[in-house]
Image: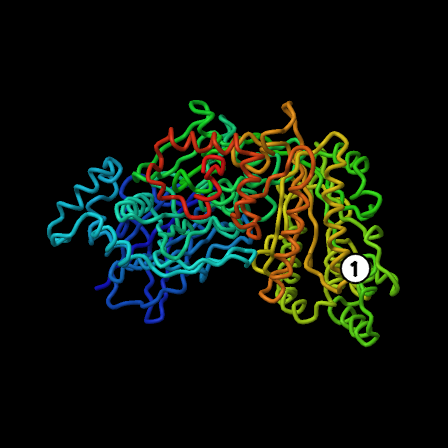
Amino acid sequence: MNAYRIHIRSGDQGDGSDTNVSITVTGDKGFFHTALDRTNALTQKGRLFHPKSDSVFEVKHKGSLGNIDLLEVNHDASSHVDWYVESISVEDMTSNTLYEFPCNKWFSETKEDCRQSRVFVERKILDRSKYESQAKGGVVLLQQAGLVKLTLKQTEDTFSQMKSLTLGKSAAEVATEIIKTFGIQKSFTNWGGNVTVTSLFAFFPWRLWQVKAIIVCARIAGMKVRAIGATHSWTELYPNEATVLINPALMMPESGSKPIEYNSANATVKVLCNVTTFRIKQDQLKEKYNFMFNTILGGVTYGGIIGTGCHGVGKDCPAHPDLIEEIEIVNSDGLLVTYKKSEKPELVKAVGTSMGLFGFMYTVTLKVHPREYIVEMHNSFNYKVGDTLLKGDALKTIVERNFSTEIFWFPFNSAPLAVVEDTDKVEFAKSLIGQVAGGISCLNLGSRETWNPLNDELLIKEVNMKPGETPQGELYYDVKLAKEYIQTKLTKNAPEWLANYPWLTPLFTSLTNCSQKSCKIPGTNIELGEPTRIVQQLPRAISYRFWVHQGFTVYDLEFAHVVNDDYENIATACQDVVDLVTEYANKKEYPMSLALEMRFMSDSKSYLCPAVVGNGKPAGDSIKVAYVEVLALGSLQTRPKWVEFAQRVAEKWMAVDGVKPLPHWGKASELPATPQFVKYLWDNNGENMQNFLDQLEVSGADPDRIFFNEYLETVLNNPSKL
């Protein structure tokens, strides 16, 4: 007989269920159908299927189902209740394999699509046997309750005392054997596609005790440990192949907790490390709270964006690390430590943007605004590069009248065919427009004679509060998501196209600019882009395309610039980019094959966050920071020219007078840790970098520096002390 354990997680919405529930579990070798009730329930206390609870059942079946790939759940409608199911998992107790099926569906006569029977086929498979073997191999002797209490010395002693396992080996040899035996070879590539890491010792833990065990084993073995976020560009913060890599993608909260826990009384939200910004936005909409800004990408995880000091957009809003009230981190002793802003504010300034140097971030609790904000967003194309982007007074007028301002320049949009000299290529380009873009009426082909960047139009997204107005309905966002998915898939091969036919780059950037506009494809009712004006909830207003990380790869370079009172230094930073784009275009080269993007925020108090803007920042509590970013489509063929271009942009920005800009840790892979670059960082942010190192030492989180790698050792080594 094979045993199968079924876990059903009921959501905190609705009534739960007190009526008959049955399930059919189907694999590639068979199926079974059973009622889920007290006769096979392992959950003995309380009501089954109660809201915000887990109900667990065990079913015996003659023979194996094989790989489970389908569930059908039936709910008796006789009690007229509304039951919301978050997830269902089926655990094959014989093969030690867990099949997880995310649900997030109503069983109801009135909710959603009014269905009482549903089929689920999307699932995630976890082979637990490898981890259980790891536990049986020795880590189980340290596990759960025991490991929480053990110090590093006690752990070493425990290994040394395990005669049946060690056979005379040292604790370090045993720990090394465990890591090498149960770590798997795994490659990880960021969303930009410009950094790929292959670790020989990658782990995918799903429980906290496993994270602790992995870190303790690695430390005893004398190995380095790095945790990774998901999706976001992490530059050389990545490990090398001999580093123990912890990927938190499968992490689950401890019993009684949820991945996202909003506390309206304290105006905080507690977030598990692998929760994405998209899930947080969905929770904000449901619970009606706000950060007052949002990270633009939807697929990045909080373990990644907190550690690198990521930001969103909002004139008077800080970066994510500045919102931290509490943060839980597993340190190099394998202990879960809670750092509270109310108790140790200086330490929290370091723990926030820490690049993982304090350890593995488990959860973070952030301050929020406990109310819903309705805003109005204007998408305007009425501004030009020459009269706005390169004019400090024009930038100041626009930014200071808005709650949030985001500016895009997609180059060549005023004359995309001007750089094409061959007549046949021009005719081919026009034909391509007709076939691919359907003859989009808003595309301006401009003059065939010259391209002047000053005539290019800008896309400016302006957001302001509009209390009392009715936001856009759900149907709009369903359609928007579908259109964006189609557009993403259609352009997935764009990097390869432009690598083989670089002269098409101006046309591509112009079409990208045009795709943001509200216009119809001639002869159809199909609208592209977004409306000129839209009223919506704040989390929906400040966001980028959800599917972008599933499309083409992107290279990016970003610096945080302090904004002078007249904004002229920001106009100069943009002028540097315009000049370089023009210089390369005159050589028929197009390294910035996507856009210049600019967002405005307030400064940060987190020591290593790029928005801390260095030692020399002016006094005051409200300092504006402009994040200026250049982006290109990523391909191996075009990368050398992109790296050259990005480094030249960085050189110009780092040479400005006054307060020097600082690079975004997650968007600087083109800036290796050369002596010149390290000196620049210490010359312009050395005080904050030293404060970070001092707090790291005081914390005792990593005395052996197991969370450092070569890049971080170099960058955080004060050159004046060498």
Residue of label 1: 520
Where 134 falls versus 406 (above or below)? below
Spot occupied by residue 36 in the image (x, y as percentages of width and height): 33, 53
Q: Quadrant of residue 313?
A: top right
Spot occupied by residue 404 in the image (x, y as percentages of width and height): 69, 37
* In this picture, residue 478 sits left or right of residue 74: right
Q: Nearer the viewer, residue 143 or 458?
A: 458
Where 406 falls versus 614 (above or below)? below
Q: Nearer the viewer, residue 378 or 204?
A: 204
Instruction: Work out whether residue 255 can be spotted.
Output: yes
* In this picture, residue 630 sits left or right of residue 4: right
Residue drawn at (54%, 48%) of the image: 111
Residue drawn at (68%, 33%) of the image: 658
- Circle 1: residue type: Lys
Where 214 falls versus 690 (above or below)? below
Q: Nearer the viewer, residue 292 or 647?
A: 647
Q: Quadrant of the C terminus?
A: top left
Q: Quadrant of residue 634?
A: bottom right
